Each structure stands twice: as C-alpha cells, then as structure tokens.
Image (cartoon, helix red, strand yellow):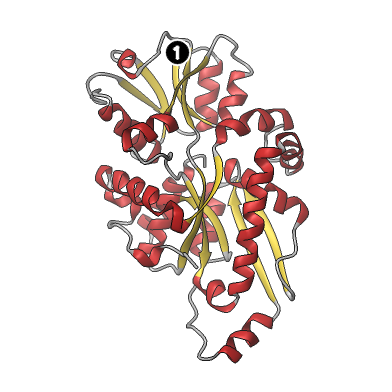
Amino acid sequence: MKKIISLMLSLIMVLVLTVGCTNSNEEAKKEESTPSNIKVVTPAGTPTLSMIKMFKENPHIGDNISVSYESVKSTDLLTSKILSKEADIFIVPTNLAANLYNKNSGYKIATSTVWGTFYLVGNEKVSNWDDLKGKEIDMIGRGLTPDAIFRYLLIQNNIDPDKDVKLNYFGGASELATNFISGKSDLSLMPEPMLTKALTKRSDSRVLIDLQKDWEKATKLNSSYPQASLIVSEELINNHPDAVKSFLGEYKKSVNWVNQNPSEAGEYYEELNMGLTKMIVEKSIKRCNIEYVSAKDAKESIDKYLNVLFEYNSKLVGGKLVDEDFYFTK
C-alpha cells in the first residue's frame, strides 16, 4: 500500500466504484430518479480552471441531482480522496487515470481537457532544439511525466538527454519558479500558470520552446499530449447515465467559456483563494491549452501519450497499457 500511495503522490504532483448494470429499463429509470449527490474533485491550477464556470455557477445537471465541487492544493489530500473513492468525478493526470484503471479502481476516462502546459523559458539565445546542446536546464518531475515528455522530445530532435544537456531537478513548480525569478536559472522548463507568474517578475526572459507544438510535430498526430483528463466512476455511469451526459455537456460549455472569457474566468478563480490572481490567470489561459476532447476523439492521442510514458517507465501507467474498456465513449 505504501508503494501505491507513494506512486500516486508522485503522479499527482505534476502541476500538480462499480455497480452492476440494471436488469431492465424500469430499474434503470428507477435508479435515475433516485436522489443523488455527485462529488467532483479537481487539483488546483489548470484542471480547476477548466471547470471554473461550474464551480461558480453550479449548473443544473438533472432532477434530484445535486453536485458539489472541490479544488485541492495538497497532493496528499487529493491522493487520499482518490484512494478512498471519495468523489464520483475527478480531473487527474491522464497517466494516473490509466494507473487507476489498471488497478481496477472503477473509473473510466470521459474526456481530456488539458493539452500540455510546459514551455522552455529563459534569457538564452535559443531558437531551436539544437541550440540546447551544452546547456543546463532546470525542471521538475524527475522520473515522472515532465521528464518523460522532455526526454522524448530531446531524443526526437537528435539530442541525448544524458550527454548533450544537463538537467537539474526541483521539488515543485513553486521552487522552480523562485529559483528562476531570482536569476539563478537561465533556462527552465516551466508549466502554466506558474510560468506567467514568473515572467511578470523577470522581464529579461521569454518563452523559447513550446513543447506542445513540438510534440505535435514529433508524433504527427495533429494534437498535443493529453496532460490531464476527467474520469467518472462506473457506479455513476451505470446508475445515472443521463446525469453523466448532462454533466459532460456542461463541462464542455465551461471549457469553451474559459477560453472566450479569460477575464471573468480569472475573477472566478481568484475567488477560490488558490494562490493565483485574476491577472495571472487571465494572461496564462492562452498557454494553458484547455480544450474539451471526448475520450472517443482523443483515443489516438491518449494511446500515443501512454505508449511514450510506458516506454520510459511502465510504472507511470500502472505496469501495462490500457484496453478498450478504459474509454467511456457513450
């Protein structure tokens, strides 16, 4: 158990349940009409931002259905809620969704909505990947998804991550940003929205490489990597299919609204007191790459992403690749 908790803690740091089908239509209708409280938990940052309209407005999902929303800053707390199956719906790193599925947790992936938030930033003269040779780069996530993604792209651009560059690892995005802001780092691989916050305090630096665009080029999939996804418990899917459909519809509206109304989204987020101001959130949204893509439409991109992670470290996805049942496509 300690090993499982430790792995989940590590997975969530970046950026950081089942009921049988009813036997008849009458039983299904009965279940659907039963009062239900749906619990939704998201990690702070971009995942919460993608759902911020729903946090603020709590839209109607269905008769006899109530929904509560919670955003958590603590990795330990989020891990605890997942292990105890406290919520019906979570937004989690996509590889954690696979990890949970491979441990028969009873959750399916319904949509991917955070499509990469990592950028190389600094004051060095870097215009392409080849310019990184001989450089020191500060980053987070040793052995985790940021490491896997960055090393994959280095290799795809003919750079040996162990010989051609020196990678320095920090414990978290806040520590990384503090080091960068102090001027101790010339090149940092940083996630949004922490990146925008850092750039406002260090005017001599700029974004040098957009990892999302280069992932698209390397994989030839016409999409970035699905960094975070929404998962739904099979219990909720089986007992309240209409509520799930309605919830996902409202979530799609929320994602679109955030991109179209960055100022209001910033206001809503600041009200949560999660450590980011309206201005920072508003400025970061363009680089947060928030887009609603259903599991069905995202499947190819998810499979590729999980394959890259599996080849780097199979434990990141639970020791094996997922099968078709991982995807909630109804």
Using the image as rendered, state which of residue 53 and residue 174 is in the foreground: 53
| Residue 170 in sight from this viewpoint | no
| Residue 97 in sight from this viewpoint | yes
Answer above or below: position of 241 versus 308.
below
Using the image as rendered, state which of residue 134 and residue 232 is in the foreground: 232
Using the image as rendered, state which of residue 316 and residue 286 is in the foreground: 286
Residue depicted at 66% across the width and 52% down the height: 253
Q: Give the image location of residue 40, x and y in percent.
A: 62, 60
Answer above or below: position of 99 versus 13.
below
Q: Give the image location of residue 48, x and y in percent.
A: 62, 47
Q: Give the image location of residue 286, x and y in percent.
A: 60, 31
- Give amino acid for label 1: Asp
Q: Secondary structure at mark 1?
A: loop
Answer above or below: position of 93 versus 65.
above
Residue depicted at 25% across the width and 45% down the height: 311
Q: For the image shown, how many numbered marks are present on the structure?
A: 1
Write down the quadrant of residue 320 in the picture.
bottom left
Quadrant location of the N terminus? bottom left
State the residue position of label 1: 186
Write down the quadrant of residue 68 in the picture.
bottom right
Residue depicted at 62% across the width and 34% down the height: 285
Answer above or below: position of 51 versus 115.
below
Q: Give the image location of residue 36, x and y in percent.
A: 68, 75
